[in-house]
Image (spheres, rainbow, N blue to C red):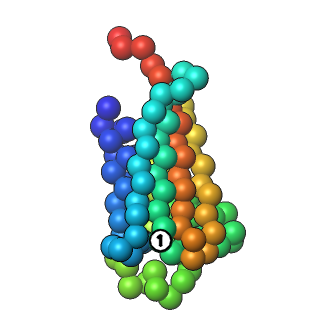
Amino acid sequence: MAEYSYVTLQLIENAYIYTDPKTAISVEFFNRDGFHNLIVMDEGLGLSQIEMETIFQKFVRGYKEKKTDIPGAGIGLTLVDVTTKFLGGTVQLKSQEGMGAKFTVRFPIRSPK
């Protein structure tokens, strides 16, 4: 269960860090079609198409000048991606520069042992 919590907290923390305090962050969690679904959306800086292609790689952060003022090493989303895959899930990102980001994570529902 710690892995699920890590993914959830990391995405929420990223949304909080990259979003103006006056704008909304939305978190949804639901089960559908045999999957746990987590959606984290923000109205933050957003990502360009080029950034989205590399954002899950180690030590990669956004390229905007504003983002260099924000602390971080660029491994949080890498660990989200690796952890999600380890659990048999997927993570998708939809974003547009200046329009925020939407992360959708799906984990298969496993029977308790």
Q: Is residue 6 visible?
A: yes
Quarter of the rendering containing residue 18 = bottom left
Q: Residue 19: image x %, image y %?
A: 41, 71
Q: Quadrant of the N terminus?
A: top left
Q: Is residue 86 visible?
A: no
41 vs 50, nearest the viewer: 41
* Mark 1 closeness class: few <14, some 14–19, many ≥20 residues within 10 Å: many
Q: Residue 85: image x %, image y %?
A: 54, 39
The residue to which callout 1 is attached is 44
Q: Residue at x 40, y 60 (%)?
A: 25
Count of labels in the image: 1
Q: Residue 11: image x %, image y %?
A: 41, 55
Q: Residue furthest bottom?
A: 65
Considering only vertical position in the picture, is 63 above or below 96? below
31 vs 88, nearest the viewer: 31
Q: Quadrant of the C terminus?
A: top left
Q: Residue at x 30, y 37 (%)?
A: 2
